[in-house]
Image (tube, rainbow, N blue to C red):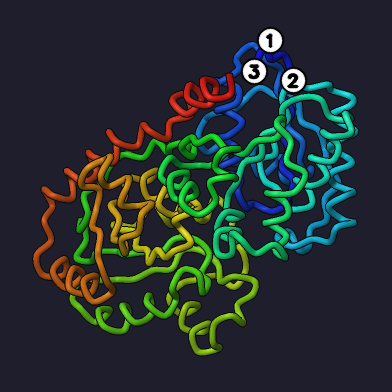
Amino acid sequence: MHGAVQKILACEFRFTNEMHTPFNAAWLKTLALAFPQSKLFFASAKSYQSHVENVEKHHGVFTLRENRTLEIPTDNELVRSRSTDWKIFFQIYQLYREIKPDILFYNSTSPYAILFTKLFLWLGLIKCPVYVVLHGELSAHCKRPKDKKSMWYRAFHWLNHPQLNYVVLSEVIYRELLKVDPGLASESLAIEHPYLWHEHKTHTANDSDTLSIAHLGVINVYKSIESLLHLVDKTQSLPGIQYKLIGSVTPKWKEISTEEYERVITLGASRVPITTDDYYQAVANIDYSIGFGNKRYRYSTSASFLDSLSFIKPCILIENEYVAHFFSLMGNIGYLCKSVAEMQALVEQLSTNFDADLYAQQQANILKGRDVFNPQRVANVLRARIE
């Protein structure tokens, strides 16, 4: 883009609870670093601003900005009606008219938000470049990338305007997108997911007689709950192995059976969303994180993987394109397994033959390699690709 960027308006379109607050805190920092001479405005629900500030407090970071309040309903944050999205969008448009930003960012989005924005761009009512950050939306779209009845297909392929582009949160995800929807990829730029790291010291695993292995984040069918419970059944009786579930059961818990629901509660999952404070405290006290990645993570980042890196916890993961990319980039930061059976064999090995020196090397590799997600580094890439 040409000309100085004097004002930036970044909008959290969807969330009012603590969802995506680590991303927003890191993203605001990234924007401030990418455009240090610009005035930054952050528009979100009033409650959400407090949640983001709480994350910043944990990291000892505060991004200078001017907050603006959006009236956003607290229910159905993932699926809203067209009329509700219009009301949120029109508030953003009113802020656009007041602030007159040089760039407008959507930190999250919806199909209607994209379509409304494109329409206003074509009508000349919005004149600045617009960048839409994509999260799980890509997973939803790429399941049926040619389904013209899908709202995501319509959002991404109707009314396309040269001033509206997308931000994909990983180079490896961008490469996967290029395979299934090259048209959408051509309107996108790729950066790594920025993250604010915790200043936790590395700890020596097995300080006690038990290795703590934890699944992080929301529990749902997309995270292979059956595989998790199968592994627990096969290995929880091993000496020195303890499993934890740190997070809540998805609000749509009926996607899993009642028996599975009760079992994950027994393993420590919460029936309600846990606070950021409780989550951070719990993750700090584990030895390994565990994940059963699936095709979803070809197109969206894994927050639990980034949380593992933040707390310097080696990972035990089912291999997928996303995590394999970072293992290749960062070196030995844990274990990639081809199957649950291979993961079971690994846990059995850790139970009887834990290697403290290898664990320390994995932690050192995490500390060195995670700089790829550093907001300053991401900011440099973002600015170069926008300019």
Tag 3 secondary structure: loop
Quadrant in the rendering for residue 371: top left
Tag 2 secondary structure: loop
Q: Say which of 265 and 40 sits in front.
A: 40
Say what amino acid the circle numbered 3 marks: Met
- Residue 249, given in percent of the width and then of the height, sits at 56, 71
Say what amino acid the circle numbered 2 marks: Asp
The N terminus - image quarter: top right
- Crowd around label 2: few <14 · some 14–19 · many ≥20 (10 Å): some
- Crowd around label 1: few <14 · some 14–19 · many ≥20 (10 Å): few
In the picture of the structure, the residue carrying the numbered disc 3 is 1
Please say if the residues under marks 1 and 2 sit with CB atoms less than 8 Å apart. Answer: yes
- Residue 82 sits above or below residue 220 on the image: above
Say what amino acid the circle numbered 1 marks: Gly
x 31%, y 60%: residue:
319
Q: Which mark is residue 3?
A: 1
How far apart marks 1 and 2 lie (CA) works out to 9 Å
